[in-house]
Image (cartoon, rainbow, N blue to C red):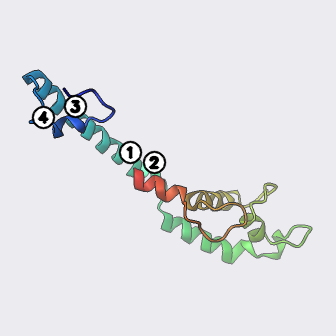
Amino acid sequence: MVHFSLSAWTYPVVLGLADAGPWDVVFSVLLMFLNFGMQVMFSYIILGVDFMGEEFEEQVAFAKRWRSSFAHDWKYVDLTSRSLVTRVCGGDGSLMLANRQATLVEHINSYMGLKHDEFEAGFFQTGILLCTLC
């Protein structure tokens, strides 16, 4: 007897091995196709433009242009003589400018599993693990 389990992939593997009636076989195959369809739809949503947002190459181009124009400009130095780019990369929460850049740095650090003021990724990287699982 095959018991109901957490995976729909169990049933097609044991179809020829278990004593199952015709309705059990039809249900198992239907369940397998339904599971496959749901995984395809999930992958389509996760990899779609609506979910992923702008291409990362566009973000890199914006960041380079921002860094060469505003990031090191003396007009945006704070009272402690820290440049805007130093404050953005440091995760300064009191920024009035460059919020988009600060958010981009935060997203990259979250993807790479970096903590505040870390510059090398460790063994466990949450974003890469999530991409592997999806």
Q: Is residue 96 above or below residue 65?
A: above
Q: Pointers 1 and 2 in contact (CB under 8 A)?
A: yes
Q: Which mark is residue 45?
A: 1
Which residue type carries mark 3? Leu
Q: Which mark is residue 51?
A: 2
Q: Which residue is mark 4?
A: 15
Which residue type carries mark 4? Leu
Disc 3 or 2, which lies upstream in sequence?
A: 3
Residue at image position (44%, 48%) is: 50
Label 1 crowding class (10 Å Cα cut-off): few <14, some 14-19, many 20+? few
Disc 4 or 3, which lies upstream in sequence?
A: 4
Under circle 3, the secondary element is helix
Which residue type carries mark 1? Ile
Structural distance between the alpha carbons of marks 1 and 4: 31 Å
Residue at image position (9%, 22%) is: 21
Disc 4 or 2, which lies upstream in sequence?
A: 4
Q: Is residue 109 left or right of residue 22?
A: right
Which residue type carries mark 2? Phe
Under circle 2, the secondary element is helix
What is the x, y in percent for residue 107? 60, 57
Residue at image position (61%, 69%) is: 63
Structural distance between the alpha carbons of marks 3 and 2: 27 Å
Mark 3 or 2, closer to the camera: 3
Disc 1 or 2, which lies upstream in sequence?
A: 1
**Which quadrant holds the N terminus?**
top left
Q: Which residue is mark 3?
A: 31
Structural distance between the alpha carbons of marks 4 and 2: 38 Å
Disc 3 or 1, which lies upstream in sequence?
A: 3
Structural distance between the alpha carbons of marks 1 and 2: 7 Å
Q: Quadrant of residue 109?
A: bottom right
Structural distance between the alpha carbons of marks 4 and 3: 13 Å
What is the x, y in percent for residue 102? 69, 60
